[in-house]
Image (cartoon, rainbow, N blue to C red):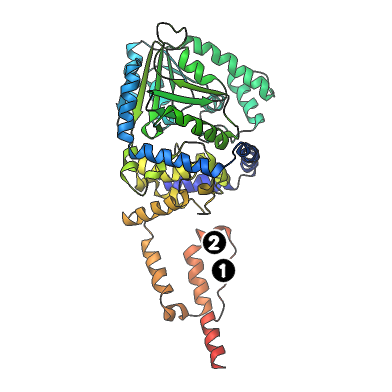
């Protein structure tokens, strides 16, 4: 089944699943209420958003220089930088490290980029045990599902769903409370932190001037995953770079506010390399894998470059009317919602994922809410244009016919209303008309009525 067919089938199912919609609306509703309060910490939010966009613009326009600065400074701190042009190289680098340290167990902090390269599947195929330590990711791993949302991976599940899952997979009592479920996960994962030889994470930001990565979280699992094991591997998309550690004072609160509605998340950590001789905690070896995997395709396109400003807060997903109806799994991609619909065709192929840019009402809510002012809905239009320019759209003949008819008064007036009704219904019966009332063309067009009135 094609990606388009899969998307349409899943979207059709989810859009009319009342239980799914109820859970999604409940969780997103709580998010929107919290974010509204969180924004009150800013005396001038719009200025903060503009500053953030300007910093990311400068970072992306000089991306090569900032990444070289990061490598130089991180290496000076005792760490190792590995450059990976695609998912295959990144996975190969992780497996090489795992073989060198004879690793058997891996603990992972929440990381969408590892989902992008399907790291878990490759590690498990190589015989390693992999444990997701973020609670939402842990739930999804138990259920054999991909993350549903880039910030809240199990957003589509109710507390009853999670209690049932834990009962079936972990053998605990039925109907545990959220607090009890959290303690069950905590107890199980604490054992794995102590056992694991490797901890893997992503990073929210790459800091060029200090050679550091910055991670922000609410559970503390990332700190445990990056400090308990003897080896820490951070896999980071190259677009995550910011020029200076001073910029975190702006980006961390923005990410927290738009991601979860907090003033700042509970745990904010800066990691600059393996532990030193005078330090008690931390890994003995630290690697940062800088992943391209199609990002330079986005960078090379002046129309699309702005998409690399994204700080992965998930705000555009939560306000998107399409996402709020069909959910995250319908997209069948790592990055869903408006930002995913923009970048996925360039990361994974326009021909396979061009349909995602059509999954938008172009209402502009995504652009309005973006903390770094990315012109999201305009970029969705640009993706549609690129698909047409590359001759990937199969219904171009229909639009040509429609354009020709709209520019010709004679063609618009031709034929009876009955013939028009029949033709239109035949054309859209499997698409537009499937969930809509039938269209009835009037017997006389406005043009004919106007002409008759002028004669009178």
Q: Is residue 171 visible?
A: no
Tell me if residue 354 comes above or below residue 181 in the rendering.
below
Q: On the rendered structure, is 106 left or right of 139?
A: left
Tell me if residue 232 comes above or below residue 340 in the rendering.
above
Q: On the rendered structure, is 200 left or right of 187?
A: left
Q: Are marks 2 and 1 in contact (CB under 8 Å)?
A: yes
Mark with earlier residue (2, 1): 2
Q: Please state the total of marks drawn on the protein image.
A: 2
The residue furthest bottom is 456
Q: In the image, which disc is placed on residue 378? A: none
Image coordinates of residue 23 in percent, x first then y, are 64, 38
Q: Residue at x 39, y 28 (%)?
A: 236
Q: Quadrant of the N terminus?
A: top left
SS at mark 2 in the image: helix
Q: Which quadrant of the structure image shows residue 207?
A: top left
Q: Is residue 351 visible?
A: yes
Foreground of the two, 417 or 454:
454
Image coordinates of residue 165 in percent, x first then y, are 60, 26
Q: On the rendered structure, is 326 left or right of 102?
A: right
Tell me if residue 180 comes above or below residue 417 in the rendering.
above
How busy is the neighbourhood of tag 2: few (under 14 within 10 Å), some, or many (20 plus)?
some
Image coordinates of residue 435 in percent, x first then y, are 57, 57
Q: In the image, which disc is placed on residue 433? A: 2
Q: In the image, which disc is placed on residue 439? A: 1
Foreground of the two, 156 or 240:
240
How busy is the neighbourhood of tag 1: few (under 14 within 10 Å), some, or many (20 plus)?
few
Foreground of the two, 125 or 309:
309
Q: Quadrant of the C terminus?
A: bottom right
SS at mark 1 in the image: loop
């Amino acid at each position: 089944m094609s990606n388009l067919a899969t998307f349409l089938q899943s979207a059709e199912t989810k859009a009319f699943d009342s239980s799914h919609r109820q859970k999604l609306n409940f969780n997103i509703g709580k998010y929107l209420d919290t974010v509204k309060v969180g924004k009150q910490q800013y005396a001038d939010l719009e200025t903060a958003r503009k500053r953030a966009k300007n910093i990311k613009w400068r970072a992306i326009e000089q991306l090569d220089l900032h990444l070289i600065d990061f490598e130089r400074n991180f290496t000076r701190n005792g760490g190792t930088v590995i450059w990976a042009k695609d998912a295959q190289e990144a996975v190969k680098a992780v497996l090489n490290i795992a073989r060198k340290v004879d690793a058997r167990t891996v603990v992972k902090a929440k990381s969408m980029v590892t989902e992008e390269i399907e790291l878990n599947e490759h590690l498990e195929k190589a015989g390693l045990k992999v444990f997701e330590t973020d609670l939402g990711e842990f739930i999804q791993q138990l259920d054999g599902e991909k993350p549903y949302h880039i910030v809240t991976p199990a957003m589509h599940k109710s507390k009853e769903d999670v209690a049932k899952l834990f009962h079936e997979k972990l053998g605990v009592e039925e109907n545990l409370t959220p607090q009890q479920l959290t303690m069950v996960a905590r107890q199980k994962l604490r054992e794995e932190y102590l056992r694991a030889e490797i901890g893997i994470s992503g990073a929210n930001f790459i800091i060029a001037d200090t050679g550091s990565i910055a991670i922000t979280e609410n559970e503390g699992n990332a700190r445990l995953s990056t400090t308990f094991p003897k080896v820490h591997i951070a896999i980071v998309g190259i677009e995550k770079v910011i020029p200076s550690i001073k910029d975190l004072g702006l980006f961390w609160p923005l990410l927290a506010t738009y991601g979860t509605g907090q003033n700042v998340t509970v745990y904010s950590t800066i990691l600059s390399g393996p532990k030193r001789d005078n330090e008690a905690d931390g890994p003995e070896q630290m690697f940062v894998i800088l992943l391209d995997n199609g990002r330079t395709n986005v960078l090379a396109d002046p129309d699309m470059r702005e998409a690399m400003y994204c700080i992965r807060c998930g705000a555009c997903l939560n306000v998107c009317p399409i996402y709020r109806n069909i959910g995250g799994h319908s997209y069948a991609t790592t990055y869903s919602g408006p930002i995913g619909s923009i970048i996925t065709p360039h990361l994974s192929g326009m021909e396979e994922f061009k349909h995602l840019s059509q999954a938008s009402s172009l209402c502009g809510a995504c652009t309005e809410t973006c903390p770094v002012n990315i012109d999201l809905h305009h970029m969705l239009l640009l993706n549609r244009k690129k698909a047409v320019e590359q001759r990937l759209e199969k219904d171009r003949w229909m639009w040509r016919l429609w354009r020709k008819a709209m520019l010709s008064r004679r063609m618009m007036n031709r034929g009876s209303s009955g013939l028009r009704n029949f033709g239109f219904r035949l054309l859209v019966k499997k698409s537009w008309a499937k969930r809509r009332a039938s269209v009835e063309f009037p017997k006389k067009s406005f043009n004919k009525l106007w002409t008759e009135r002028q004669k009178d």
